[in-house]
């Protein structure tokens, strides 16, 4: 039973967003003297365009609300309280109705993307270990798989925390207990005592999902001190719907935070990553020096466009939970169809059964064909895999053309 997520008509969306905008300050109607911002430049973006009355997202964009801070904590800049409430409801939809958290027990905000959200999590846990355990930087480690997103490398560099990557099975991309154990033992031998674990919910290249039970079982067996962050930048709006038995939810007490990216599967504008974390943790990145901001700032990015939150909220509410489940069901079926055709051609590929990414081995696809269909390699200079992502625009008609060309290419090679 969904607690927050309800399907809404276009008229209902318009009414709620324009009501929210009316609760924000108006730079046109009020004497606003102390805010270092204004509406979008009116020499380019017209305030009185007739179509705006039917365009809630564009109206929000033009009014330019700043969603600086974290609105789930209670106190935020009161100038933009209307659209902040929209963002707060969006966070609740994602945390409760998608990731099965308890109502009101998660904090979060709309980030610039998955990279920022991943760095935010690691920043929080680094500070948590330093404050609660007096850990030094060289006692803290980030642990993730070799298939993890490059944002972990960025986080390591920015936060001065060493990064250790464990290898995975080369064919099925699975977490291997012995390889993880080797990595943990190496880190401990180098003085690491506190572990920030990043678990993948559909990796960017393979759509692979890390087995969290293997990871937590080993950590607990070794009596390790750890915090777990789930990188669902790609899979967050997909995997919970394709695999209803997923252990990567807030119901799992070992998980503290999640990254989701609405500008991937949700098809929202870029700049709509989502960071979610259990109550009581985001405070470790409170920047008290931001004292001129009502409620202070707990986020990495600071100022954020309120229009981005409105866009994602509109997309989720227009589809509704059942519409969203249907969308994922269709994409799953398309991916199943593609895999059946690849099997018939004896093409070697990897696909997590709950994912819409199919990654073909380099030796099984002609490079010119891969380039023609814009398949993305794991490494542009020395590719070993090429991936296909079944998005909304990747119809069976397009896949039929690809399969036909793949078959012809393979037959010509065999002659």
Image: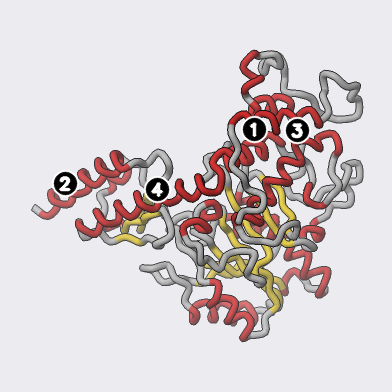
Q: Nearer the viewer, residue 2 or 316?
A: 2
Say which of marks 1 and 2 sits in front: 1
Residue 37 at x, y = what percent? 81, 28
Q: Which residue is mark 3?
A: 20
Marker disc for residue 408: 2
Q: Which residue is mark 4?
A: 330
Task: Categorize mark 3 by other alpha carbons within 10 Å: few (<14), some (14-19), many (20+).
Answer: some
Task: Categorize mark 1 by other alpha carbons within 10 Å: few (<14), some (14-19), many (20+).
Answer: few
Residue found at the far front of this picture: 1
- The tag earlier along the polypeptide, 1 or 2, is 1
SS of the residue under disc 2: helix
Marker disc for residue 12: 1
SS of the residue under disc 4: helix
Residue 88 at x, y = what percent? 73, 46
- The tag earlier along the polypeptide, 2 or 4, is 4
Q: Quadrant of residue 84?
A: top right
Q: Are marks 2 and 4 in contact (CB under 8 Å)?
A: no
Q: Are marks 3 and 1 in contact (CB under 8 Å)?
A: no
Residue 264 at x, y = what percent? 52, 45
SS of the residue under disc 1: helix
Q: Quadrant of the N terminus?
A: bottom right
- The tag earlier along the polypeptide, 1 or 4, is 1
- The tag earlier along the polypeptide, 3 or 1, is 1
Say which of marks 2 and 4 sits in front: 4
Say which of marks 1 and 4 sits in front: 1
Q: Residue at x 68, y 70 (%)?
A: 227
**Residue 369 appears in view:** yes
Q: CA distance from mark 3 to mark 4?
A: 34 Å
């Amino acid at each position: 039973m969904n607690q927050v997520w309800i399907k809404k008509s276009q008229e209902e969306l318009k009414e709620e967003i324009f009501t929210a905008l009316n609760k924000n300050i108006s730079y046109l109607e009020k004497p606003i003297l102390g805010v270092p911002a204004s509406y979008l430049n009116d020499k380019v973006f017209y305030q009185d365009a007739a179509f705006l009355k039917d365009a809630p997202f564009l109206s929000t964009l033009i009014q330019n609300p700043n969603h600086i801070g974290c609105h789930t904590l209670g106190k935020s800049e009161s100038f933009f309280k209307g659209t902040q409430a929209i963002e707060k409801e969006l966070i609740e939809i994602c945390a409760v109705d998608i990731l099965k958290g308890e109502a009101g027990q998660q904090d979060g905000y709309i980030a610039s993307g998955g990279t920022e959200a991943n760095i935010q999590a690691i920043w929080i846990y680094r500070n948590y270990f330093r404050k609660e355990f007096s850990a030094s930087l060289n006692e803290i480690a980030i642990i993730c798989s070799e298939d993890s997103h490059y944002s972990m490398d960025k986080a390591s560099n920015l936060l001065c925390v060493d990064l250790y990557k464990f290898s995975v099975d080369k064919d099925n991309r699975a977490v291997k207990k012995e390889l993880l154990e080797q990595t943990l033992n190496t880190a401990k031998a180098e003085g690491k005592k506190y572990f920030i674990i990043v678990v993948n919910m559909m990796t960017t290249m393979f759509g692979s999902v890390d087995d969290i039970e293997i990871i937590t079982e080993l950590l607990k067996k070794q009596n390790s001190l750890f915090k777990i962050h789930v990188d669902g930048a790609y899979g967050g709006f997909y995997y919970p719907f394709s695999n209803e038995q997923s252990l990567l939810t807030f119901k799992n007490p070992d998980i503290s935070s999640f990254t989701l990216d609405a500008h991937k599967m949700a098809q929202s504008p870029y700049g709509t990553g989502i960071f979610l974390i259990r109550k009581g943790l985001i405070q470790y990145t409170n920047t008290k020096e931001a004292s001129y901001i009502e409620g202070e700032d707990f986020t990495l990015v600071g100022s954020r466009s309120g229009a981005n939150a409105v866009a994602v909220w509109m997309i989720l509410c227009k589809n509704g939970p059942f519409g969203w489940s249907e969308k994922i069901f269709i994409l799953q079926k398309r991916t199943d169809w593609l895999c059946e055709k690849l099997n018939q051609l004896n093409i070697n590929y990897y696909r997590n059964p709950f994912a819409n990414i199919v990654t073909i081995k380099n030796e099984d696809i002609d490079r010119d064909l891969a380039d023609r269909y814009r398949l993305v390699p794991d490494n542009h200079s020395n590719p070993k895999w090429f991936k296909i992502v079944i998005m909304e625009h990747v119809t069976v008609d397009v896949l039929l053309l690809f399969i036909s060309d793949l078959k012809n290419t393979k037959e010509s090679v065999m002659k």
